[in-house]
Image (cartoon, rainbow, N blue to C red):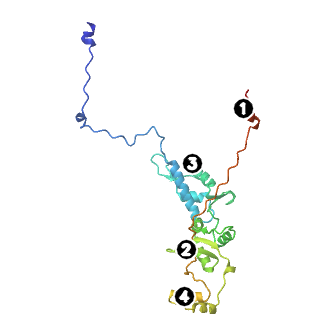
Amino acid sequence: MSFLKPGNATSAPSPTPSNSSQAGKKRPRPDANAPVFSQPENTNSGYETMTRITFALDHLRDNEVPMTFDDVFRKLSIVEPSGPGGKPRPAPKGGRDWNVLYTILKRHPKVEYDSTGFEGAGSFRYRPKHNVRSAEHLKGLLQRQTSSVGIKVSELKDGWPGAVDAINELDKKGEILVTRNQKTSQPLLVWQNDPSLSHNIDAEFRNMFLSIALPANPDDMRSRLEAAGLKPVSAPRDVKPLNNQPQKKKKKAPRKGMKTSNTHMLNVFRDYSDKKK
């Protein structure tokens, strides 16, 4: 028979190699420099740009005066390769890095840009939350406050490096009110101080007040206050007794009849069985 011919016989499957036969082989490590085609190439250009913007803002914050973009760009010390085998050179004016940083800083919310500054070259200046850069500016800001909320010193220090020294000086003069940290005595909040509310006490009255001796025993103090017709704070409060009697339940008012609707159909449901003949 044809199906018994050797040519048509099914070949036997080859044996699967056991784990013991593959134990001696080491798995090759993937190449660390091989490109990953499922992701775009990471050039870190965006990260470098934002880092440079941060350094530029710090430089503008430390300098309270307006600056040209040339000064800011020179402070960043950006270099670029000059070619194969060449040494790095400073990034040129008008290059890619120059244009990118100029455009971002010009529109940044933390930067004040004046196109007419430096004879039309443009000026850049750090923009703090409060436009305060001196003691007179601070007093003017406090006078314009419409609420009693104090101004944080941390917000004043942003853009005004000498804020703490000026606040301490105004506090000594009594021109502002300051709350401080109990441990470090650093100012935290500031308010306006009205000098008209400050009254000097005569030395004679101060000495008279301090010469009054308080009784050593608190009970004596209480009896002396009561003898003078004053109520001491430690006096027991008059508490009214609670009414523990059960309250009477109110009787519910009788329920009124419901409003009748569909009055034109009352005759339909009436019983006419008594009228049958």
Question: Label 3 crowding class (10 Å Cα cut-off): few <14, some 14-19, many 20+?
Answer: few
Q: Earlier in the sequence, mark 3 or mark 1?
A: 3
Q: Earlier in the sequence, mark 4 or mark 2?
A: 2
Name the residue: 62% across, 56% down: 109
Alpha carbons under labels 4 and 1: distance apart: 98 Å
Which numbered circle lies on residue 221? 4
Alpha carbons under labels 4 and 2: distance apart: 35 Å
Which numbered circle lies on residue 96? 3
Tell me the amino acid under the disc marked 3.
Arg
Tell me the amino acid under the disc marked 1.
Asp
Question: Label 4 crowding class (10 Å Cα cut-off): few <14, some 14-19, many 20+?
Answer: some
Of the residues tagged 2 and 3, which is closer to the observer?
A: 2
Q: Quadrant of the C terminus?
A: top right
Which numbered circle lies on residue 181? none
- Whether 7 is drawn above or below 166: the answer is above
Of the residues tagged 3 and 1, which is closer to the observer?
A: 1
Q: Earlier in the sequence, mark 2 or mark 3?
A: 3
Q: Are marks 3 and 1 in contact (CB under 8 Å)?
A: no
Tell me the amino acid under the disc marked 2.
Arg
Q: Earlier in the sequence, mark 4 or mark 3?
A: 3
Most foreground residue, 116 or 131: 131
User: In this figure, which residue is indicated by the disc labeled 1?
Assistant: 274
